[in-house]
Amino acid sequence: MEENRIVQKNVELQRQWYGEPLGDRVRRLVVAFDVSQAFLADVLGISAPMLSQVMSGRRAKIGNPAVLARLIMLERKILTPGVASGEQSAIDAAMEDVRESNPTVGRDTFPVHPGIDERTLLAALRDIAEDENLADAADRLEEDFPAIADLLRRAGKNSD
């Protein structure tokens, strides 16, 4: 019973610190990149048992800031056209790029502001893909990533 309470507390801390439980974020990456949890752990630079503990809530946080930075890098790469369309060479390149990265964490690499505004994000998506590619990527992501699919559709519709 005590372990269950600790897990619940850790998952709640993850919601506060990371916006949602890390298990949810990691599972989305496993599905998006079609890799095992152990392979993903290797790409992130964390041991598979440690990643498992973080995902299950037995641990509350990722202790190494570079591992968190790599996780965020992979989340952002899901939006790239090749990865979003399921192109294996793009997926492999994205995984290798993150694995080989040596991110530094500081005030310049993790801004404290909440992020870019939606209009800027939609414009950036329009810059990297044609309307029909955005719509195709949205269709492919709809089932597993409905929020991303919606964003891609809005970017495709609003190209003025």
Image (spheres, grey):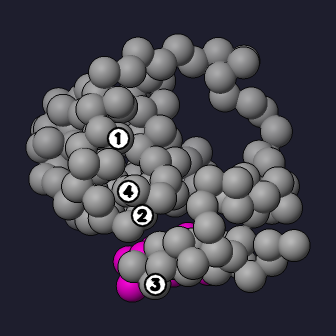
What amino acid type should be assigned to the residue bearing mark 4? Val
Instruction: Report how far apart the C-alphas of labels 2 and 1 lie in the structure.
Output: 11 Å
Pointer 4 with pointer 1, Cβ within 8 A: yes
- Depth check: give the residue in front, 21 or 130: 130
- Depth check: give the residue in front, 128 or 75: 128
> Which badge, 4 or 3, is on the more N-terminal residue?
4
> Which badge, 2 or 3, is on the more N-terminal residue?
2
Alpha-carbon neighbours of circle 3 within 10 Å: few (<14), some, or many (≥20)?
Answer: some
- Depth check: give the residue in front, 62 or 72: 72
Q: Residue at x 52, y 14 (%)?
A: 104
Residue position marked by numbered label 2 in the rendering: 84
Q: Is residue 145 magenta?
A: yes
Instruction: Report how far apart the C-alphas of labels 3 and 1 lie in the structure.
Output: 21 Å
Span highlighted in magenta in the image = 141-150
Pointer 2 with pointer 1, Cβ within 8 A: no
Pointer 2 with pointer 3, Cβ within 8 A: no
Q: Residue at x 72, y 18 (%)?
A: 108
Give residue 43's position: percent from left, percent from top: 24, 33
Horizontal side of 102 relative to 1 (left or right) equals right
What amino acid type should be assigned to the residue bearing mark 3? Asp
Instruction: Report how far apart the C-alphas of labels 4 and 1 lie in the structure.
Output: 8 Å
Give residue 86's position: percent from left, percent from top: 31, 64
Residue position marked by numbered label 1 in the rendering: 94
Secondary structure beneath disc 4? helix
Instruction: Report how far apart the C-alphas of labels 4 and 3 lie in the structure.
Output: 13 Å
Residue position marked by numbered label 4 in the rendering: 83
Secondary structure beneath disc 1? helix
